[in-house]
Amino acid sequence: MILIKNGRVIDPKTGFDQVADVLIQDKKIIRIAKDLEEKEAESIDASGLIVAPGLIDIHVHFREPGQTQKETIHTGALSAARGGFTTVVMMANTKPVLSNPEVLSETLELAAQEKIHIKSVASITKDFDGQHLTDFDALLAAGAVGFSDDGIPLSDSGVLHEALKKAKETDSLLSIHEEDPKLVDTLGINEGKVAHQCGLTGATTVAEYSMIARDAMLALDTQARLHIQHLSAGESVDVVRFAQKMGAKVSAEVTPQHFSLTEQAVLEIGTNAKLNPPLRQAKDIAKILEGLKDNTISVIATDHAPHTHEEKNVALAEAPSGMIGLETSLQLGLTHLVAPGHLKLVQLLEKMTVNPAELYGFDAGYLAEGGPADVVIFDANNTYKVDKNFDSKSSNSPFIGQELLGQVKYTLCSGEIVYRS
């Protein structure tokens, strides 16, 4: 039994926001009220702190099986807990790809040993071949929560159309990496002045928003649920908004890095700022902020993508794209969205809790009596400097050395403390 005392309790689902106590027992929240007393409970003093639902990240890469030199499910879970996350959804681009029920089941058995809730998608096409659909029914039965070929765009519109029809039939969510390979030269860096300074031709914004336009119309035709991953271009926000107004069941996520940094970071930081999709320009961030404000973009997800120091410590053109993000995500939201007044705290929390939960139908992302005891307790006001002391196995973050707002004090999952600072 745990009693959280005197915290500012925020439930984004109902709008509840007041100083109160939270009593937890047997994986559930028993009471939310003022001045609770329970002699047998372990007490946590949350005075001056925020008590919110455990954060949910629907886009992480834990690299197991096959690339455990970068991350394991265990180190990924530790990193998530330290960041305040109690539920995550792993992507399918492991080695082997999560394309068949046997590999998926084995991976989920490993995940079930961890102290946070770890879900996984399966791939849309077999081994990411872009042509042959996986067995959606068998993979759902094996535990998949949805489908994604993240990392590889689905170039064949006919294949995606068939996948959307199957998703509609099975009431499952497709999450799509949008990028036309024919409109991209060097992955991971925005096509423009910075790329040219580096002697490269980069990835155009039209590569992203043209495919979003195509796929949104396929989603409109099928009325299947389509989720746009790691949106980065300003025009992409306009396209998603347009499709939503037309009646397409299209949702979108943005990563903290894409509202916090511009392409200039590639020059200043180097390969740790090489991301796919790439960091764009200030005008793109302005459109992303508009999309966050009007809920065109309903989810913030990290695209946590660990790489080793050796992999990143090469020439820009040769380095893999991606960065770790679980341990800085909440802080970047507080620093770049809440502090400047772009979003209220409850709006930030909506995009990191209840909204992603509702996309997948998870019983999570809210605080209520009788509900799950998945809770994050954090200080929204302190500042700290990001260092290389991550719980992730990797440290490829462009935010090392930066001062950010916020610090996670406790993470509780299923009523147990899984992280304390």
Image (cartoon, rainbow, N blue to C red):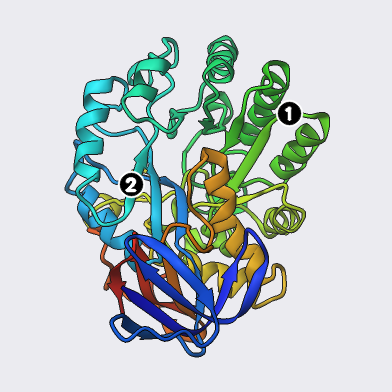
Foreground: 249 or 9? 9
Give the left or right position of residue 161, taking residue 373 as reference: right
Identify the residue shown where x is 64% and y is 68%.
346
Q: Secondary structure at mark 1?
A: loop
Query: What amino acid is labelled 2 in the image?
Result: Ile
Amino acid of disc 1: Ala
Identify the image quadrant of the C terminus.
Answer: bottom left
Depth check: 104 or 69 in front? Answer: 104
Q: How far is mark 2 from mark 1, CA to CA?
A: 29 Å
Report x, y in % for residue 262: 59, 60
Residue that badge 1 annotates: 248
Please identify, in this view, whether the residue under mark 2 or under mark 1 is nearer the observer: 2
Q: Secondary structure at mark 2?
A: strand
241 vs 124, left or right, is: right
Residue shown at the point (73%, 28%) measured from the top left: 248
Q: Which quadrant, please, contains the N terminus? A: bottom left
Q: Is residue 185 visible?
A: yes
Which of the 4 image quadrants contains residue 376? bottom left
